[in-house]
């Protein structure tokens, strides 16, 4: 795909932390990384993101990993469950926010192959098989958990999950 560059600067207010950030994002093919440069209390951070493929049986799932490259030791991980439309920019932004707070962020993919719905009807069609089959849903969540535990950036003994909408059900 075509490559391009955009940049932004601002502040993230989260509880008692104020994190100044400079965002550098590339319009890119899906296999390249994004790089986010943050500063918290005068300490520079280099938040990097990339897609991560993992499996549930024969189904390929594509999560979205965000971590601070300036931290060399494994960090606790917060998995982010997506809303009913599938893993999207909102879930990915939450992964980046978790990385900016010192965690590894991982936006999970319940539907597989990064599928997203374009309408309420499509969203419902994607979500309902997992609402109606909790064993299938649990299998997808366990696959995501197994995937993050095997990442070099993650402290495998400290993994949590949060979620929004359908992702709240997942959590």
Image (spheres, rainbow, N blue to C red):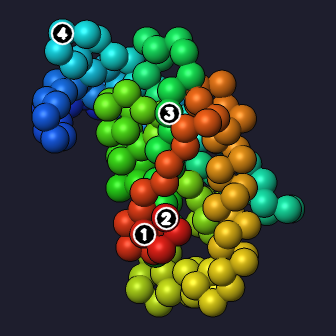
Q: Position of residue 131 (x, y in %)?
A: 58, 85
According to the picture, the residue beneath numbered tag 2 turns out to be 171
Residue at (58%, 80%) from the top-left corner?
126
Q: Position of residue 56 (x, y in %)?
A: 78, 60
Q: Give whichever of discs 2 and 3 has the lower sequence position.
A: 3
Tag 1's secondary structure?
helix
Q: Residue at x 47, y 90 (%)?
A: 121
Disc 3 to disc 1, how far (Cα)? 20 Å
Q: Nearer the viewer, residue 63 or 75?
A: 75
Q: Residue at x 53, y 12 (%)?
A: 72
Disc 3 crowd rating (10 Å Cα; few below 14, some 14-19, many 20+) is: many
What is the number of the mark on residue 42? 4
SS at mark 4 in the image: loop
Label 2 sits on a secondary structure element that is loop
Disc 2 to disc 3, C-alpha distance: 16 Å
How many badges with numbers are in the image? Answer: 4
Residue behind mark 3:
76
**Viewed as shown, does residue 109 lie left or right of 27?**
right
Please indicate, yes or no, whether residue 14 appears anywhere in the rendered image: yes
Query: How far apart are the alpha carbons under marks 4 and 1?
Result: 34 Å
| Residue 140 pos. (x, y %) | 69, 64
For label 1, the residue is 168
Q: Earlier in the sequence, mark 4 or mark 2?
A: 4
Asked if the residue at tag 1 contacts the one at tag 2, i.e. Cβ–Cβ closer than 8 Å, the answer is yes
Between circles 3 and 4, the one closer to the viewer is 3
Residue lying at the far right of the rendered structure: 58
Q: CA distance from mark 3 to mark 4?
A: 22 Å
């Amino acid at each position: 795909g075509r490559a391009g560059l955009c940049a932004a600067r601002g502040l993230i207010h989260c509880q008692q932390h104020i994190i100044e950030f400079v965002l550098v994002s590339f319009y890119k093919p899906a296999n390249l990384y994004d790089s986010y440069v943050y500063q918290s209390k005068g300490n520079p951070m280099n938040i990097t993101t990339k897609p991560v493929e993992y499996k549930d049986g024969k189904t390929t799932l594509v999560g979205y990993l965000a971590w601070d490259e300036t931290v060399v030791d494994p960090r606790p991980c917060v998995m982010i469950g997506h809303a009913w439309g599938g893993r999207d920019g909102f879930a990915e932004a939450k992964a980046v926010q978790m990385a900016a707070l010192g965690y590894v962020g991982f936006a999970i993919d319940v539907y597989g192959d990064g599928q997203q719905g374009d309408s309420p009807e499509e969203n419902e069609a994607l979500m309902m098989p997992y609402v109606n089959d909790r064993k299938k849903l649990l299998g997808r969540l366990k696959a995501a958990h197994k995937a993050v535990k095997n990442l070099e950036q993650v402290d495998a003994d400290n993994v949590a999950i949060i979620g929004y909408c359908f992702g709240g059900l997942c959590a």
